[in-house]
Image (cartoon, rainbow, N blue to C red):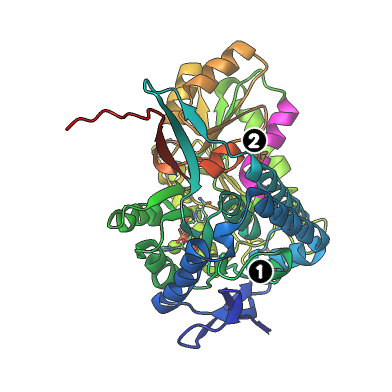
Amino acid sequence: MKSYRMYINGEWVESCRGTYFPVHDPSTEEIIAEVPDANAQDVDRAVAAARAAFDSGPWSQSTAQDRGRLLFRLAQKVRDETPRLAELESRNCGKPIVESEYDMADVATCFEYYGGLATKVLGHVNPVPANALSLSLREPVGVAGQIIPWNYPLLMAAWKLAPALAAGCACVLKPAEQTPLTALEMAQWFEEVGLPPGVVNIITGFGETAGAPLVQHPQVNKIAFTGSAAVGKQIVKMAADTVKRVTLELGGKSPNIFFADADFEAAIDGALFGVFINQGEVCSAGSRILVERTIYSRFLEAMTEKAGRIKLGPPLERETKMGPLVSKEQYERVNSYVEIGKKEAKLAIGGSRPASPARGYYVAPTIFYDVDNSARIAREEIFGPVAAVIPFNNETEAIRLANDTPYGLAAAVWSRDIFKVFRVVKALRAGVVWVNHMQPTYVEAPWGGYKQSGFGRELGPWGIEEYLETKQVHINLDEQPIGWY
Ligand code: NAI
Ligand code: MG
C-alpha cells in the first residue's frame, strides 16, 4: 500500500491534522493506497498558495507562450507515462484498461489543445462614438476551485486544469475521494514542466469537509464542478454569498432514440455502447433507450442477446469490456435502482451480481423494458450499467418522451432520413446531440448541459471563456476633454 501526500504550494504535505483515508481497488475490494484527509484548514493553505501565485508570483508575469509551452510539456509527460497512468487509473476506478488508455490519450490531447489556445485569446476594439480607443481585454478570473468526480479521474482533472492554466488562473483541484491517485501522480511533473509553486494545488478529501470549504472560500473567484445534481444545487447556494462564478456539469438521463429506418446492427451496438461504456458510469450515458414500436421487440431481443456477450472481468485484462463499479457505495446505489426497476418494469437481462469474478463491485449489464417514462428508473440518474427501454409510436411522441426529463445533457438520434433527423435534432433540449452515434467526445467541441444538467460549457474555445473576465478600457484621445465644470 502506498501512502501519498497532497500537493500544496509546490510541496508534498500531510493534512494539518495528519490524518489519512484509504483508497480502494474496486475489483479486489482491497485498500491500495492512503491519502491525506484535508479539511477547511488545508483548503485555507491551498487557497493562500494559489492566491499568492496568482497575485504576485512568477505566474502573474507569465506570457501566453510560456503557459502554452508548459501545457505541451505536461501533455508529453502524460504520453510518455501512459502505460503506468492507465494501469493506475484502471486499478483505482475499475474501468477496462483499454478505456483508460483512451482516456490518457484524451488527457494529453486536452493539454495540447489548450496549450495551443493560450496564444489565441483575443481582445477586441469596441467601435464607440467618441474620439477614443475602447478596448475589451480578456483577463484570467483568478483562483479557480475545481471539484471533480471519479468516473474519468485524470480526464476530468485535465478538462478543468488545461483551460484554467491557459487562461492564466491558479487552481485548487479536489479530486473525488474515491479516485485521487492519478492526479497526484501527475503532480509529480508539475515542477519539471515549469509550473511555479502554488499555481496548481491538489487537495485530497471528502466533499463536505474539503469541497464545501473550497466553494465557500472568500479568496476563490470561481468554482468548476462536475458531479451529482444534488451537490451541484448545494454549490450554487454556497457560492452565492461570495458571488463566485460557477460552472456545473451534472449528468443526466439522456435519451438514445432509434427510428425503424436506422441501420439495425449499428443501432444495436450503439444502444449498448451508449449506456454500458465505462460500466454506465458516464454523465452522458444513453440510459433511456427509445425505440420505435415497429422494431421494438426485434430490437429488444437483439440487444439482450448481445448484452449477454459483454465480457465482464478484471480491469487490467485486455479482453475486459466491463469492469466493476467504482465503490461499494456506488454498487449498493446501483443495485437499489435495480430492485426499484424490478417493481417498475420488465427485466430482459441482468438484475443481479454476476457469478464471476467472485470479488469486486460488479453489476451485470441490466436491461429493463416496457419502462414508463414516469418510472424512477427513467427519471433518476443511476450511473451504472442499467438501461431503460421505452417504446414510442411516432416522431412527435419520441420528441415528447426525450424532452420529458429534468435533465438535458445529451441525446442521440438514429435514422437514415435526413429530414426527420434534423427535425429531431432541433427539437431536442440537450447540450450535446449525436446522430447515428453516441458518446464520441472531442476537445474541440463544446460540452455541457441544458436544464438541470448544469450551466457553462467545457472544452473548445468555450472552455477557456469560463476562466476569463472581460475588462473594458476607455482611452480618451481628445486632448481637450469636455470641461463640464
Ligand atoms: P458527488 O456529486 O457527491 O461527488 C462529486 C464530487 O463532489 C466529489 O469530488 C465530491 O467529493 C464532491 N462533493 C460532494 N459533496 C460536496 C459538497 N457538499 N461540497 C463540495 N463538494 C462536494 O457524487 P457521488 O456521491 O460520488 O455520486 C452520486 C451520484 O452522482 C452518482 O450515482 C451519479 O448519479 C452522480 N454523479 C454524476 C457525475 C457526472 O459526471 N455528472 C459524476 C459522479 C457522480
Ligand atoms: Mg456524494
Looking at the image, residue 44 sits to the left or right of residue 328; the answer is left
Looking at the image, residue 143 sits to the left or right of residue 437; the answer is left
Residue type highlighted by circle 2: Met
Residue stretch rendered in magenta on the structure: 264-277
Residue at figure coordinates x 37%, y 23% from the top left: 130
Number of on-image labels: 2
Instruction: Look at the numbered disc 1 and give the secondary structure of its residue.
Output: helix
Furthest residue to the bottom?
A: 18
* Percent position of residue 389, x then y: 54, 36
Furthest residue to the top?
A: 419
Residue at figure coordinates x 44%, y 36% from the top left: 450
Viewer can see residue 358: no
* Percent position of residue 171, x then y: 53, 61
Looking at the image, residue 47 sits to the left or right of residue 67; the answer is left
- Give the quadrant of ligand 2: bottom left
On screen, 228 above or below 27? Answer: above
Inspect the magenta stretch and tell me whether residue 266 lies in it. Answer: yes
Residue type highlighted by circle 1: Ala
Q: Quadrant of residue 454?
A: top left
Q: Quadrant of residue 241?
A: bottom left
Residue carrying label 1: 187
* Percent position of residue 23, x then y: 60, 76
Mark 2 or 1, closer to the camera: 1
Q: Quadrant of residue 262?
A: top right
Furthest residue to the front?
A: 480
* On-image quarter of the C terminus: top left
**Pointer 2 or 1: first along the chain:** 1
Magenta part mainly helix, strand or loop? helix
| Residue in the foreground of this view, choosing between 179 and 157 | 157
Residue carrying label 2: 438
Tell me the distance, in whole angstroms, between the alpha carbons under discs 2 and 1: 33 Å
Inspect the magenta stretch and tell me whether residue 349 lies in it. Answer: no
